[in-house]
Amino acid sequence: MIFRIPVSRINWTTSSFLIGTFILTLTAVPFYLWYFGIDWFQFALFFVLLAAIGFSVTLGYHRLFSHMTFRAKLPVRLFTLIFGAAAFENSVLMWASEHRRHHKHVDHDEDPYDITKGFFHAHIGWLLFKLLPQPPFDNVADLKKDPLVMWQHRHVHLLAVMIGFVLPTLAGFAWDGWVGALGGFLIGGVARVVVLQHGTFLINSACHTIGRQPYSTRCSARDSFFLALFTFGEGYHNYHHQFQHDYRNGVKPWQWDPTKWLIWILSKLGLVGGLRRVPQEAIESTQAQVRDLRSKVES
Ligand SMILES: [Zn+2]
Ligand SMILES: [Zn+2]
């Protein structure tokens, strides 16, 4: 132990990547922009990759593979597996296994990002330090049978580097030679990884800390419009923990949930189907129960 940091438990590879990309985003990225100026192409590349990879995580990793809230045809499955890898959040198999464990044991010891161990632990600490041995993939038997998922699991690091870093670097080079390549690497690659990762991490930390609990007070998960803005709609986390098999997180039609809208659009295009919805009466009766419970506690 140095300064109460459990050195022997540090996950060196993950920690170096998370801290290294974060420092580069705060130093090299602003320096590049100051030195070479702002180029609209670099920003377009940043946002296109942010959307492609972000939706691959929320729509693919989370709502499709972890919770099976709808069925998807090959193009959607392949796209989300390939681009999802570039979020550097490991394979679908690993992600879904940890996420299903989070739902099952939320706020308890076996929850990998247990908020009761503190905001920092739930946000990033659980990745920097491995306090427990990696549990077996015993809750993803369905995914193990999927050859595409297993292919992604075997090649996830190569896919991540190719799509996450090589692709924006090559696009930048094609646009503006070596200066463009450096910009593509730093802005579309490094800064985009950091923004997206901390967006995902916020769901595990802030969405279990800030916001309302209209659907359940049994666990720490909360609904927040503000957090939904930065997380492709995943901020309605209280609803999601209560009804994890619903393809919507922001269940009200006006709630900001671009992932739900994209799933709906893909269903109209025939690329996905079998969208699962909790019946309206069940949602309303759950809300009424929570209101009753609250008024009893307050009176
Ligand atoms: Zn959660
Ligand atoms: Zn979930």
Image (cartoon, rainbow, N blue to C red):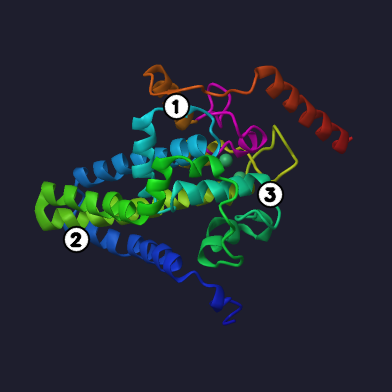
Q: Nearer the viewer, residue 93 or 184?
A: 93
Disc 3 is placed on an element classified as: loop
Q: Which residue is under mark 1?
A: 263
Residue appearing at x 34%, y 60% in the figure: 25
Q: Which residue is under mark 2?
A: 35
Crowd around label 1: few <14 · some 14–19 · many ≥20 (10 Å): many
Kind of residue indicated by mark 1: Ile
289 relative position to 156: left or right: right
Disc 2 is placed on an element classified as: helix
| Highlighted magenta segment, given as a residue range | 233-256
* Distance between the alpha carbons at the discs numbered 3 and 1: 28 Å
Residue 101 in view here: yes
* Distance between the alpha carbons at the discs numbered 1 and 2: 41 Å
Q: Does residue 86 lie above or below 2 as drawn?
A: above
Q: Quadrant of residue 266?
A: top left
Please state, as top left, top right, bottom left or bottom right, where the N terminus lies in the image: bottom right
